[in-house]
Image (tube, rainbow, N blue to C red):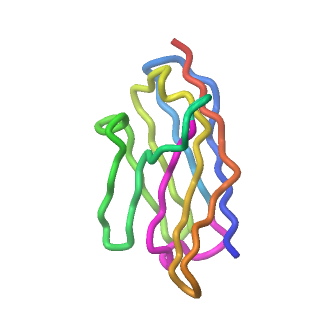
Amino acid sequence: QVRLVESGGGLVQAGQSLRLSCRASREISGANSMAWYRQPPGKQRELVALSTTTGSVTYGDAVKGRFAISRDNAKNALYLQMDSLKSEDTAVYYCNAYYILPMPRDYWGQGTQVTVSS
């Protein structure tokens, strides 16, 4: 079992920045991938950014050039730096971890609300 706890959400104005954090109860170095997803009001959950153990990073088209995902394996922490925020970035942001061992499974945090006012 892996517990993920997000923090750092809040209310900001358009153009400002926020940094989200996710702390894991298990070594994230053992995760096949770590990612951030978001779910805007009334919409489906979508990928924001994904980081694999091989070092590859994928960003959703809507956040490319504005958001950056990073990880600190020593702290079992995942981060999302969000710059130049827009009102359409308003969503609940979820941390995700995918482990293959001991058996393939996705883990999710409880989510943190990000609200961007225009």
Residue 91 horizontal side relative to residue 52, left or right: right
Q: Residue at x 58, y 67 (%)?
A: 106
Question: Does residue 27 show up magenta in the picture?
Answer: yes
- Image vertical order of residue 91 relative to residue 2, above or below: above
Question: Which residue occupies the foreground of this view, 22 or 35?
Answer: 35
Quarter of the image with the N terminus in it: bottom right
Question: Which residue occupies the foreground of this view, 19 or 113?
Answer: 113
- Image vertical order of residue 24 relative to residue 70, above or below: below
- Image vertical order of residue 83 relative to residue 45, above or below: above
Q: How many marks?
A: 0
- Image vertical order of residue 4 relative to residue 91, above or below: below
Residue 62 horizontal side relative to residue 14, left or right: left
Q: Residue at x 48, y 44 (%)?
A: 46
Question: Does residue 118 show up magenta in the picture?
Answer: no
Q: Position of residue 110 (x, y in %)?
A: 70, 51
Residue 16 horizontal side relative to residue 64, left or right: right
Q: Residue at x 57, y 84 (%)?
A: 103
Q: Position of residue 20 (x, y in %)?
A: 55, 44
Q: Residue at x 54, y 85 (%)?
A: 101
Q: Position of residue 88 (x, y in %)?
A: 48, 24
Q: Position of residue 70 (x, y in %)?
A: 42, 55
- Would you identify the image quadrant in which residue 32 lies? bottom left
Q: What residue occupies the far bottom of the structure in this picture? A: 102
Magenta span: 24-39
